[in-house]
Image: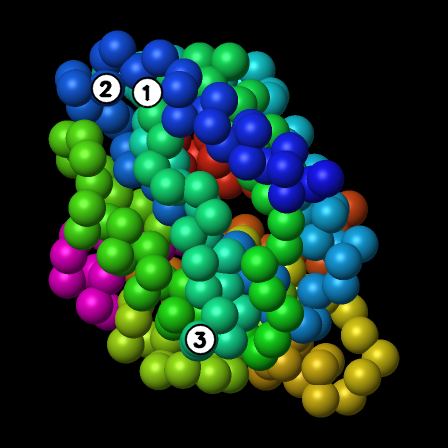
Amino acid sequence: MSRLMFCLLFALLMLAPQARAQEGVDVALVLVDDVSGSINDQQFEKQKDGYFAAFTDPKVHAAIQGGALGQILVAYVEFASDFQVRTVLPWTVIKDAASARAFAEAMRAAPRSFRGRTSISAGIDEAMKLMANIPIATDRKVIDVCGDGTNNLGRPVSEARDDAAKQGVVINGLALANDSDVPWLYAHTHPPGGLGNYYRENVTIGPGNFVIEINSFESFAEAIKRKLIQEIS
């Protein structure tokens, strides 16, 4: 039933009016979300609920409409291992509360794509494929990486990051310092210096890039809202 609901919501999303799209957008933003095995189903649902709360928040709508063109372009990617990466929602114009809610509902209804190890580099590379096919003019390109651990599969994440920077793409990060009693998992989610510092040194790049670090999925919704407003503005 959830997959059927996702298909219906996605169809409605694609049919949403986009009359001003040809004028350009203020930013092209790819949300790159970690769905590796260290994130359980309950935590995954909290992520989805957090995105929904953020995209239906009037402050986010005000940030979107406060731009020079008053609209943004957003896509959503999920990744786990380097062979487990998928564009869940393709490029979508968001310009008001209705289009933001339609995107949020489609995101929340989408079934989880994978479970596996953590290849942040694969997530960034998938986002860059989207960046190579932006259907609307924009001067700003941003990748928003959300994850709870270090890159442990695929090519070095710093290589993917640097390749993105060469194309003028900014990468920001939301580091989820996910607690675990499993020793090897704790080392993955709490590297030396902290996950936020790992993201700053290996993942994020570009003018004005930033990292938000949280220690609980309970803080996810507020963190995503802050992050979106800062990226859009």
Q: Is residue 163 left or right of residue 51?
A: left
**Real-space Cα separation, disc 3 to disc 1, in angstroms:** 33 Å
Q: Is residue 133 above or below residue 113?
A: above
Is label 2 or label 3 in front? 3
Q: Is residue 110 left or right of residue 45?
A: left
**Real-space Cα separation, disc 1 to disc 2, in angstroms:** 8 Å
Question: Is 163 a magenta residue?
Answer: yes
- Look at the image and tell me in which quarter the C terminus lies: top left
Pick the residue in front: 173 or 131.
131
Residue under the image location 71 percent in, 89 percent down: 184
Please tell me which of labels 2 and 3 falls first in the chain: 2
Residue under the image location 63 percent in, 81 percent down: 188
Residue under the image location 36 percent in, 50 percent down: 143
Q: Is residue 80 above or below residue 108?
A: below
Q: Amino acid at mark 3?
A: Phe
The secondary structure type at the circle numbered 2 is helix
Q: Which residue is mark 1?
A: 71
Q: Amino acid at mark 1?
A: Gln
Task: Give x and y (percent) for residue 118.
Answer: 54, 75
Q: What residue range appears in magenta?
A: 162-172
Q: Quadrant of residue 43?
A: bottom right
The secondary structure type at the circle numbered 3 is loop
The answer to whether the residue labelled 3 contacts the one labelled 1, judged by CB atoms less than 8 Å apart, is: no
Q: Which residue is mark 2?
A: 21
Question: Is 167 a magenta residue?
Answer: yes
For residue 83, the mark is 3
Residue under the image location 15 percent in, 62 percent down: 166
Q: Is residue 227 left or right of residue 124?
A: right
The answer to whether the residue labelled 1 contacts the one labelled 2, judged by CB atoms less than 8 Å apart, is: yes
- Look at the image and tell me in which quarter the N terminus lies: top right
Q: Residue furthest bottom?
A: 184
